[in-house]
Amino acid sequence: MPVYIYEEIDSGAQFEVIQSMREAPLTTHPETGRPVRRVILPPNLGLKHTAGKEKTLLDNRKVEKAGFTKYERDKLTGTYHRVAGKNGPESFRKE
């Protein structure tokens, strides 16, 4: 059964409730009787989209092999320099 997070409308205090998906959402706190609402959270995609996976996919060799051009910004000058690919200018400055 899924765990749902609820929030008290007045105080903002949150709590978790294990409920069946078939049950109606709570409208009041089970202990205090105060009005509550269910908090909708984004899905956890940590298994498929990790920082390491993203770094591997955006590797300069893979980007170039796929036919793209990749630029990186120089933090001191604000100039973008081409680090992968053959098309486009060697560097440019975005105003």
Image (tube, grey):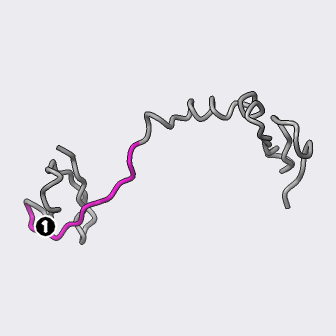
Q: Which residue is rendered at x = 13% and y = 63% of the image?
A: 29
Q: How many marks?
A: 1
* Residue 34 on the magenta segment: yes
In magenta, the rendered stretch is: 31-44
Q: Which residue is rendered at x = 24% and y = 70% of the image?
A: 9
Between residue 60 and residue 7, name the one nearer to us. Answer: 60
Q: Which residue is rendered at x = 90% and y = 45% of the image?
A: 91
Q: Quadrant of residue 11?
A: bottom left
Dot 1 crowding, Cα within 10 Å, few <14, some 14–19, many 20+:
some
Mark 1, residue position: 28
In this view, the residue farthest toward the right is 90
Kind of residue indicated by mark 1: Thr
Q: Which residue is rendered at x = 43% and y = 41% of the image?
A: 45
Q: Position of residue 1 (x, y in %)?
A: 17, 43
Q: Position of residue 66 (x, y in %)?
A: 73, 34
Tell whether 34 sits left or right of 46. Answer: left
Q: Position of residue 43 (x, y in %)?
A: 38, 48
Between residue 93 and residue 33, name the one nearer to us. Answer: 93
Q: Main secondary structure of the magenta part?
A: loop
Q: Position of residue 93 (x, y in %)?
A: 88, 53
Tell whether 71 sits left or right of 15. Answer: right
Between residue 15 and residue 43, name the one nearer to us. Answer: 43
